[in-house]
Image (cartoon, rainbow, N blue to C red):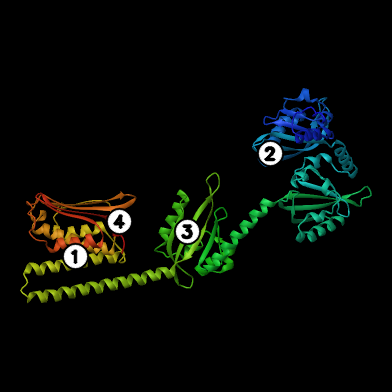
């Protein structure tokens, strides 16, 4: 049995990688910690940069950068890029230990630990000075200004007359996301472009070969696959004899611009579709400096004027002549207010077209100002709302007719009831009570008619009851609370309840004596995220209250109106000092029709 070989540090894989790194003498392979200090330095690094590993270990890697690059923090930018993107390509002048410079082409990558966390960086650099010098010599032989090409951020390529790539500028390599130009040197320039753009690219080359400037826009993907849109110029480069010797292409990345143009075109298309779908929406734009307002075809149609005249622009006061004389002062005041305050303009008014037809217009717009606050433009849109206005007028007439018929019906009902009760032995008090209840119902219908049978004012209901039962005596009713709108069903119920409470107060309660008063108060409060209405009727200064021995019509009406119909919490209290009625209900329920 042979003896075991002496143990060596590290696994076989680690020893293999170490040997591989040390044998790569044409490449500087450097390991850095997260602060950019050298922790490993191979033989290739010593040959290219001049420092031995022992003297460079622990020192910042920035020593290999030129003073001007160190000033701009090029080494830190490289590490930040590698941290953010995983790697960072680098092609620039570097500095050796003895102060001489070389053109280094390389890349920095993340160095990760066993758990995947980033522990540092690996930087690989290759000396490409000879290639750089050769490129510069070739450019000088072509008669090009190397300084301009190298400083430009545009993508500049030099082509032979067949269109094959001979040179790529540093800005071009950055734009094309390439570490070095070798992969595309000698390839046809037209092959870089998307298939649908190659014909246009070939035409631009042919134009340049003919001594003219060729130009086109197309899509070309970078070396990493990023699709970009370019604005390209192809220029002829003359030789010593004056003939075209080579071609130079200069491209600028316009991807963001194209995307913005696409978004704008889509927005304009959507606006155009919307305007075609709503032909009575007109757009106007007032140039305040020129004193001219421009209108589209819909504005012309709305006002009954010539579309060409509207499109070419008219004096600012041109359209004012069509505004109905009764509406003109309000419109002028609104425009002046917009100029002064900067608020939005929104007015609904009538216009009288040249043919005499009257139309209703809803105009909305705003004033555009410069940085100094000077008004430059006044633009907006107008909508023909004549059909809506006519519909509202028809509805108003129908509501008035309906209200008139309801009042007539209630009058007939009142007459029928009065005649019936007169021969039935009913007491005068009963006949009066029924008559006044019907009157209260009629008054409530009048209020609802004003709100187009959708809503009525709580304050107006209380004030109406006070006028009827106070008989003109000031101070008999005290009202407290901000106005609240009620739905039709709630308004009718409350009107009848107020009538019953006031009638009882006149007969037996606070309004039966001269010093008595009724205090009516209400407020809205939030209960578990929902608005509730709290309403209270309180009689003060009246005679001592005697609770009724039986439930009368008023009590039953209150219970049915609020307890069942509205789902309210109600309370009717016959305290000796005065009758008190309170109820609470969700405001949303009270505002339903």
Q: Position of residue 387 (x, y in %)?
A: 43, 70
C-alpha separation, residue under disc 1 versus residue under disc 3: 43 Å
Which of pointers 4 and 1 indicates the residue nearer the eye? 4
Quarter the C terminus occupies: bottom left
Q: How many marks?
A: 4
The residue wearing badge 2 is 81
Residue drawn where x is 56% and y is 52% of the image: 289
Q: Position of residue 110 (x, y in %)?
A: 70, 37
Q: Is residue 498 left or right of residue 348?
A: left
For disc 4, the neighbor class at 10 Å (few under 14, some 14 to 19, many from 20) is: many
SS at mark 4 in the image: helix
Q: Is residue 582 above or below residue 398?
A: above
The residue wearing badge 4 is 587
433 and 7: which one is in front? 7
The residue wearing badge 1 is 440
**Sooner in the amino-acid sequence: mark 4 or mark 2:** 2
Q: Is residue 58 left or right of residue 592?
A: right
Task: Mark yes or no: residue 530 visible.
Answer: yes
C-alpha separation, residue under disc 3 versus residue under disc 4: 33 Å
Q: Can you name the residue that lies furthest to the right here?
A: 241
Q: Position of residue 403 (x, y in %)?
A: 26, 71
Q: Which mark is residue 364?
A: 3
Residue drawn where x is 46% and y is 56% of the image: 345
**Sooner in the amino-acid sequence: mark 3 or mark 4:** 3
């Amino acid at each position: 049995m042979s003896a075991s070989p002496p143990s060596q540090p590290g696994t076989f894989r680690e020893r293999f990688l170490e040997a591989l790194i040390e044998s790569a003498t044409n490449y500087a392979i450097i390991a850095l910690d997260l602060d950019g200090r050298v922790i490993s330095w191979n033989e290739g690094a010593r040959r290219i940069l001049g420092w031995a590993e022992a003297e460079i270990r622990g020192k910042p890697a920035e020593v290999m950068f030129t003073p001007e690059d160190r000033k701009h923090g090029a080494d830190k930018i490289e590490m930040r890029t590698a941290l953010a993107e995983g790697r960072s390509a680098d092609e620039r002048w570097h500095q050796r230990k003895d102060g001489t410079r070389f053109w280094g082409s390389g890349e920095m990558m993340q160095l990760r630990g066993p758990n995947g966390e980033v522990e540092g960086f690996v930087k690989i650099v290759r000396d490409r000075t000879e290639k750089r010098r050769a490129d510069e010599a070739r450019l000088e032989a072509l008669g090009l200004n190397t300084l301009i090409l190298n400083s430009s951020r545009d993508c500049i390529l030099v082509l032979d007359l067949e269109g094959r790539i001979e040179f790529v500028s540093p800005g071009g390599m950055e734009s094309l996301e390439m570490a070095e130009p070798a992969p595309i040197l000698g390839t046809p320039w037209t092959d870089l472009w998307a298939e649908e753009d190659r014909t246009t690219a070939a035409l631009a080359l042919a134009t340049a070969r003919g001594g003219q400037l060729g130009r086109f826009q197309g899509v070309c993907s970078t070396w990493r696959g990023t699709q970009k849109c370019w604005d390209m110029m192809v220029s002829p480069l003359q030789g010593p004899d004056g003939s075209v010797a080579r071609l130079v292409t200069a491209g600028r990345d316009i991807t963001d611009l194209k995307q913005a143009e696409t978004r704008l075109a889509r927005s304009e298309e959507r606006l155009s579709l919307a305007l075609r779908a709503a032909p009575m929406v007109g757009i106007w734009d007032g140039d305040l400096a020129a004193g001219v307002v421009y209108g589209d075809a819909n504005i012309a149609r709305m006002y009954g004027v010539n579309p060409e005249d509207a499109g070419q622009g008219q004096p600012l006061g041109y359209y004012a002549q069509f505004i109905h004389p009764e509406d003109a002062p309000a419109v002028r005041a609104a425009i002046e207010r917009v100029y002064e305050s900067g608020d939005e303009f929104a007015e609904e008014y009538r216009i009288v077209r040249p043919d005499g037809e009257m139309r209703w217009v809803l105009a909305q717009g705003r004033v555009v100002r410069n940085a100094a606050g000077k008004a430059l433009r006044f633009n907006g849109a107008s909508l023909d709302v004549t059909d809506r206005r006519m519909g509202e007028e028809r509805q108003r007439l129908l509501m008035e007719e309906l209200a008139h018929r309801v009042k007539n019906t209630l009058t007939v009902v009142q007459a029928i009831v009065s005649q019936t009760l007169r021969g039935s032995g009913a007491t005068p008090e009963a006949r009066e009570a029924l008559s006044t209840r019907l009157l209260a119902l009629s008054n409530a219908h009048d209020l609802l008619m004003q709100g187009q049978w959708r809503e009525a004012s709580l304050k107006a209901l209380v004030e109406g009851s006070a006028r009827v039962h106070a008989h003109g005596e000031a101070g008999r009713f005290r009202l407290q609370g901000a106005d609240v709108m009620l739905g039709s069903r709630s308004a009718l119920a409350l009107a009848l309840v107020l009538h019953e409470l006031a009638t009882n107060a006149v007969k037996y309660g606070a309004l039966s004596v001269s010093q008595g008063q009724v205090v009516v108060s209400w407020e809205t409060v939030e209960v578990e995220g929902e608005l509730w209405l709290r309403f209270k009727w309180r009689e003060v200064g009246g005679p001592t209250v005697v609770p009724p021995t039986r439930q009368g019509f008023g009590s039953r009406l209150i219970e049915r109106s609020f307890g069942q119909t509205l789902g309210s919490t109600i309370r009717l209290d016959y305290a000796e000092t005065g009758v008190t009625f309170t109820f609470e209900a969700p405001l949303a329920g009270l505002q339903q029709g």
